[in-house]
Amino acid sequence: MSSEMDTAAFGEKHIAKGIGRLTKHVFDEGKGTFITTDKGVKLLDLTSGIGVVNLGHCHPKVSAAAAEQCMKMTHAQINIGFSAAQITLLKELIPILPHPTLDTVFLWNSGAEAVEAAVKLARAATKKPNIIVMQGSYHGRTNATASMTRSKTIYGEGHGPLMGGVFATAFPYYSQFGGATPDTPTEELVNMSLLQLKLTLQQQTSPSDTAAIILEPVLGEGGYVPAPPAFLHGLRKICDEHNILLIADEVQCGMGRTGRMWFVEESGVRPDILVFAKGIANGFPLSGIASSKALMDLQKPGSMGGTYAGNPVACAAATATIKAFRDEKVLENVAARSKQIFSFLNDLKASGTKAGNLIEDVRGSGLMVGLQFKNPALQRDSANAAAQNAKIQGQIAPKVVAECVKRDMLLLSTSVFDVLRFIPTLTISEEELSKACEIFKEALEAVAK
Ligand code: PMP
């Protein structure tokens, strides 16, 4: 019966409904910035599998390294012995971490697992229970990380009780403050957010109970908003004053995404724990945390581990990924393509056209670009007539995404604030990005008309 069923229909029937899915396409092959479906449809991929295949789908050197490792050793259990593939990787990885004190690593599989490892380490090291997260944050969907995720209620709804001891504070993003706009000075947003944090420490969880403050240095699922350097410096200062650890979750914004290997490099702020995943192995499941040796070694032997933690095939892929960043001048391409997309989107916003008038804000860093629509439905800007004039009901971003999909381009929305996120491969060519911009413009015009 099943063998005669259409592949997508089989998936609909037998795969969990709890997965939110953008399209009904069945992805069969990926090469560079393109995905081909089982029906031969070629899609321009501006999602990179949500910031995973930063070097493009099936980067030849990464795939070759994984294939070679596959023939050598596929499972090297880290609770039984050292893994050669893991040690080879760490020799490449540690020198590119954002601070020389981050010299000790624990590898796991997924981003959520790595965030949990960071929480465990922070609690064990400080002997304090509570964690402060940012409003709008996303850290995963496991029980602990769903509790820490504050971008949309759907991730926790109906699944309680989630891990306790988590408190949320403000991130300097204008949409999270009544009366603020994209023109609100950064300094004001930073001051308001740092004030909220100080109040959180006075009113909700005292410093003596607070193990760590965790943030995504570029808020991802919460709206694609880079943290201003002054905010990161402010967090560092508060953490130092109160013996609280600072955890940077660079699962989405790390590994070259913002034009530097790690976003925290821009500010020079040192996190006590760095969390990485996604782009680290360009499509193979690998994640981890890095900290100083003194901190990491406060975890008792036996308290960390996992059957598949730091799988050797994923480690070989990660080693090849890091080498490719070095050998193929990937960050130079990010800088050039970032300029290209920002100038296209800002020109469109300023164009005075119906489509351009829908755009409220273009922001981001490198190739982690957010575009927010003016949307009276969000009741932040009732004076804004653009979307009202266009008589668009509800959120604009999902409609634009649907128009892009009709034109064989994959694009994602994010957050509750009507935001589109552009997160192409870091190796996308000038021509591919021009084509993507053209398709996006057509899609937006179709929604605006
Ligand atoms: N942290 C951040 C910042 C993320 O973007 C994600 C995934 N979107 C996660 C953690 C969770 O990673 P995973 O899905 O691999 O568990």
Image (tube, rainbow, N blue to C red):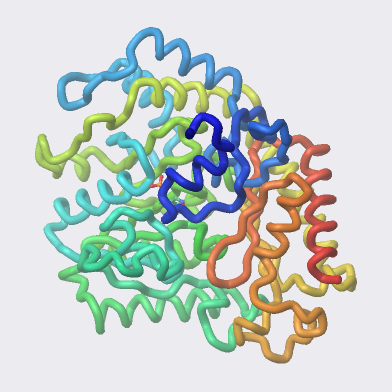
- Nearer the observer, 165 or 405: 405
In the image, is residue 436 above or below residue 204? above
Residue at the front extreme of this rendering: 1
Q: Which residue is depicted at the point 84% across and 50% down?
A: 438
Can residue 218 be spotted in the picture?
yes
Residue 296 is situated, as x and y percent measured from the top left of the image, at: 21, 41
Q: Which residue is depicted at the point 47% across and 67% down?
A: 231
- Nearer the observer, 252 or 385: 385
Quarter of the view holding residue 214: bottom left
Q: Which residue is depicted at the point 39% across and 53% down?
A: 248
Tell whether 9 sits left or right of 315: right
Residue 192 is situated, as x and y percent measured from the top left of the image, at: 47, 81
- Nearer the observer, 64 or 22: 22
- Nearer the observer, 43 or 11: 11
Tell whether 84 sits left or right of 33: left
Residue at the top extreme of this rendering: 72
In the image, is residue 189 above or below residue 165? below
Residue at the bottom extreme of this rendering: 383
Can residue 237 be spotted in the picture?
no
Residue 203 is situated, as x and y percent measured from the top left of the image, at: 25, 84
Tell whether 318 sits left or right of 160: right
In the image, is residue 195 above or below residue 269? below
Q: Which residue is depicted at the point 56% across and 77% down?
A: 175
Q: How many marks?
A: 0
Tell whether 355 sits left or right of 165: right
Quarter of the view holding residue 431: top right
Which quadrant holds the C terminus? bottom right
Residue 168 is situated, as x and y percent measured from the top left of the image, at: 34, 72
